[in-house]
Image (tube, rainbow, N blue to C red):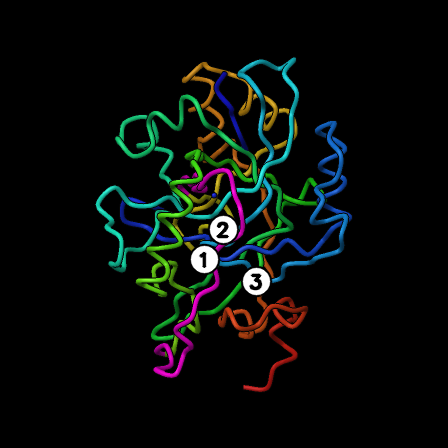
Amino acid sequence: MERCAIACTDVDRMCGRINVSDHEGVQALMAMLGMPLFPAVRAGQPKWNVSPTAILNAVVSEAMDERAALSDTPLRWGIAAPWSEPGKTVRPLINARSETLFSKPTFRDLAKQHRAIVPVSGFYEWERVGDERIPYFVQVQALPAMLLAAVFEPVTDADIQKEQRTASASPQMGFSFDDPNQEASANTPAATPAPPLHTGNFAIVTTEAIGPMAQVHHRTPVMLNIAQAKRWLATDDTQEIQAMMQPESVMEVSLRRVSRAVNSTRNDGPECLADAETESD
């Protein structure tokens, strides 16, 4: 039985940092989907600055059927590129373009059989102004938190062991979105802990940005409302899926300029959401 679940890849790399700190907002979404709160959220573990290769809880369905039970599963953000080799630094594919989701070999089978929803508080995006990149926090307007459309690739224990060996051979495989205006420090520790157990790797589906989001970046994650999220997990109708990924179908968002503290993945606290006006230039 196939599992369906609810993480720019061809040329665009956007939505490279996520926030999962609003537990009440995520809990409200879980209730709307008819699900209990994720164990990690129940334990009170806010994540203010989540970067690729992190493990996040995703909503999955046991079958492509609206009557099928939904459950949560840990997925790792980033699908290994088909051309990657153990011991070599290759960035994982963290986004999948909606326009080519059903045609690119990397994603077409996943789009048909393995779709997921990733509930988050919001995400960060950077506006490029000259040589500077200005961070914004993005939230949906109509819901207490955000449901991101994703596709995922199930992994076996052997796959996870291979990832661990690759990470050991190349600690920077997962890369980090560090300060966009600074080079990575040569003194960055080389040791990388083994990743926690996860059941698959995911990529966030993106589409063309319109409205306020387009003022910052030309791409946006596909953000679904409750009804769309349920159908994303249940339907096998390609046309219906394509319709949910159209720019005009994506939920409206609000953007707030935030502190440059979020630029560094070393920062993972409430300072990442501080208003930019509180900083001294």
Local SS, label 1: loop
Q: Position of residue 48 (x, y in %)?
A: 62, 62
Other residues around mark 3 within 10 Å, as few (<14) / some (14–19) / many (≥20)? many
Residue at numbered disc 3: 49
Residue at numbered disc 2: 213
Q: What is the distance, in whole Å, between disc 3 and disc 2 at their CAs?
A: 20 Å
Which SS does the magenta portion mostly show?
Answer: loop
Q: Earlier along the polypeptide chain: callout 3 or callout 1? A: 3
Residue at numbered disc 1: 216
The answer to whether marks 2 and 1 mark residues whose Cβ atoms lie closer than 8 Å is: yes
Q: In the rendered view, does 257 fall on the left or right side of 84? A: right
The answer to whether marks 3 and 1 mark residues whose Cβ atoms lie closer than 8 Å is: no
Q: Is residue 184 magenta?
A: yes
3 or 1: mark nearer the eye: 3
Q: Amino acid at mark 3?
A: Asn
Quadrant for the C terminus, please: bottom right
Other residues around mark 1 within 10 Å, as few (<14) / some (14–19) / many (≥20)? some
